[in-house]
Each structure stands twice: as C-alpha cells, then as structure tokens.
Amino acid sequence: MTALRHRGFRLLTGIAAATLLGACQAADIANFNSPSTSQLENAPNAATVNTTVAGLLAGSRGSAGTWASTLGIFGREIMNLDGAEPRNVLAFLIGPLEPGGFGTDMAWTNTYRNLRTGYTILDVVDKVPDYSAAQRAGVKGFVKTFMAHEYLNQLRIRDTFGLVFEVPKDPTKQGAFVTRDEAYTKIAALYDEAKADLAAAGTAFPFALTTGFTGFNTPANFLRVNRALKARLEIYRGRWSDALTALNESFINTASPSATTMQTGVFHVFSTASGDATNGLFDPAPRAIVAVPEFLTEARSRADGSRDLRASSKAVVGTVNLATQGISSNVRPTVYPTNVTPIPIIRNEELILMRAEAHLGMGNRASAIADLNVVRTTSGGLPALAADFSGDLVTEILYDRRYSLFFEYGHRWVDARRYNRLGELRKQLPSHKVFSLVPIPVDECNQRTASLPKGCVNVLGN
C-alpha cells in the first residue's frame, strides 16, 4: 500500500496534525482529542470530519520545506552546506540517487498518508448527519483539490517513473503504478471533480482555514485556487489551451500590478504557538542554507545598473562563508526572514508567468511579452521587453520564473527538465551531477519484488 505497509501507518497521524493547524495564525479549529479511526468511519460527525480536513492541510504543510529545499538543490537555487550532514552534498549534488539512499523518500510516505486520509474523508462525508448537502460538497471539493495537489507534488519528482494512484484501504493490498501521462490525466480529472463539488458548495465551508487562505476561504473563492493549481498541471504537460482556460477561471490579476498583487495567493502558515510548527527554512546566520553564488551574479541589471529587484530582495552577500567538500557560498537567502514566514502554495506572480508561457505555446508572442513585462517591471524593476522583441522568449520566461519563484517550490529544476535545459544548470565542481528525476523509495520497491516498478533503480545523473 504505497510505502505505508511497514511504517506503522495510522490514519490518525493526519487527524492529530489538525490540532497543530489550529494554532496556525488564528484558524479557529478546536482540539477534538484525536478522534479514532473507528469514530471517523463508523460514527462520523461534522466536528470529527472538520478536524480531519484540517489534518490533511497540516500534513500537506509538512512537506512544503522539501519542495523548496531539496528540489531547490537539484535546480541549483540553493545548497545545504550543513557540516553535520554531508549527505546533502554527497547525495543531492554527487549521487547516485538510490531507492534506499539518503532523502529519496522525498515526502512519498507523507504524501500517501495524506492521500489515505483524504480518501477516508471522502468515504464518510455523505454519512455525516449534521452536514447539509452544500457542506458535504464543500468538504469534497476542498479535499479533492488537495489530494490532486499531493499527487502532483510527487509526480513532478518521479516524472517518467510514474506513481501509484490507487491507495487501497486494506494495507495488504497495493495500488498499481501508472505512467506519468496516465497520472496527469487522473490528477486533472480529480481537479475537475473538485471544481464541480465547489460549485455546489454554497457560501461557506463547514471547517475553518488558516490565515494563509485569507481571501480564498469560501467555496467560490477557493474554486479560483483550484483552477490555478489545475493550470499548473496543464503547463507541466504542455496543454496550453487548457492552461489558459484554467487561468481565466483562476485569481490571476494584472490590473494595477504591485508588489502586493504579485503576492496574492494561498500559503502554508506557521507560528510559535505551543504545539504548532515553525518554518524550518528560516536560517538567518546561515548555519546550512545558502544560495548558489550565481543567483546574484547572473541577475539582470536595471536601468540604473543595480540588480534585478528580485535578486536583491531575495538574497544578500552575507558575512558568513559556508564551505564544505570543496564548495562554498556567502550568499544568504532572505526569502524566509523569520521562523513564521509563510511558504507559498501558489500566487498571482506565478499565474501571470504561466499565462505568458501558455500564450507563447499557442504562438501568441505579443500576449506572452505583455504578461512577462507585467512581472519583470513590477517585481524586477527591469526595463520592459519591446513589443516586437524577436529573441528567445523561452529563455526570458525561464529567467523570470527563476527570479520570481526562487526558493519556493523547486520550480527551476522542474522548468529545466520540461524544456530539456538541465544541462544549463551550473555544477559547482566537475564531480557534481544534475539529476532529472528521483527513484521510487526502497520500501515501495521491496513490496513489489515480483514486478519491480521501473523507478526502482539508481539515478546516476549527468
């Protein structure tokens, strides 16, 4: 059952996490003392299900740092030079990546734990006597959206190795692996199912959400988040027309652009409250996390000769030079200036860049340039591209995505793979490798010895 069989999996890990989410910046979620699995399945009520929905969101937050940090290493955004953990270099920059190697799980176990929780919620929601029909639809729409998000999180890591889509309730059974393209199709369908549910969900969710969802905490507004996340999937698989359709239904906004409108979106939030979690990407000294030096040196210049504002606002030359295993950097990321700084799930700046990419994919250079200029002038302070710009717009898009989305979700690694530009990612040493995807975790492989998935292999890198 997808790497949970030998890990003492219990559904209530997700439910217990809901009590953590209750402390996340004023979400009004009570502690129902970790209701049991049998209570949820056999006598579900609104309070129990609401708490479990919150647990699903808390579980998703638990993986957010992995997408920013480990995928950030693969994409040469950051390096982890923690002297106490040399495998951050040995595994992620040198390799090979092994099914049983350091860090290969990449939140696979947590992802499928969250998915099993999601399926359990969907199994019981229609049995909840104190929900209205609209409230049941709201639960389904929110849960399906985050389940689709969880699947896509893993697919972008495993890529052509595919993933497991079915998550059987019986821990002795195994869901079958599906190919990348099959997974894209199934995830897209799940987003669309969620859309239909959200459209029938009335004016309010029956559960509370954190302040990371301010402005998007009703079914109608959260539906726009669902469409934004669906657009990301369509961009990944190059279905440009479908991406534009989803973006038009999302919260994309280019009217009166400003730093504030660029930040509009949904976020995982943190707090120092007892029982809650802080943002583990906060590393002010720094002790371990540094930006690659070229993040600053490769930034474009503004009209006055200063750096792209996205570079100067997201990294600085610090007083500490971290060095290990022949590599070093004194460039300190400033994306997470406190231990409670939120981590974006998706925001308007990414949507505008996605629309530019989709327009280019459809052959509409003028519209692509217009969207790029909104971002590069507003966020970067750079001169606008000429309306008749004849250069390589893919390079321009990838540049803007690199600097706009730095250290958020591992975007640069995925982007380089999508455009066959992994070879352009700079290696700090000749012994370093660039990896295109990550193996399936060994626990998953060990359960399938009769027919090993193709991802149960070492990835050597180039």
Image (spheres, rainbow, N blue to C red):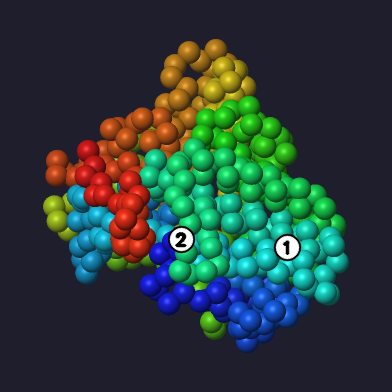
| Residue occupying the point 39% across, 40% down | 160
**Total label count?**
2
Question: From this viewpoint, is residue 118 visible?
Answer: yes
Residue 275, percent from left and from top = 53, 82
| Location of mark 1 (residue) | 139
Q: Residues within 10 Å of mark 2 (few under 14, many from 20)?
A: some
The outermost residue toward the bottom is 33
Foreground of the two, 436 or 268: 436
Q: Quadrant of the C terminus?
A: top left
* Side of 48 relative to 170 (left or right): right
Horizontal and vertical percent position of residue 396: 45, 27
Whether residue 137 sits left or right of residue 7 in the image: it is right
**Which quadrant would residue 349 be assigned to in this image?**
top right
Q: What amino acid is at disc 2?
A: Gln
Instruction: Look at 25% across and 46% down and name the residue there.
Output: 459
Q: Is 36 situated above or below 192? A: below
Image position, residue 283 (x, y; %): 37, 65
Q: Which residue is mark 2?
A: 174
Q: Position of residue 35 (x, y in %)?
A: 63, 83
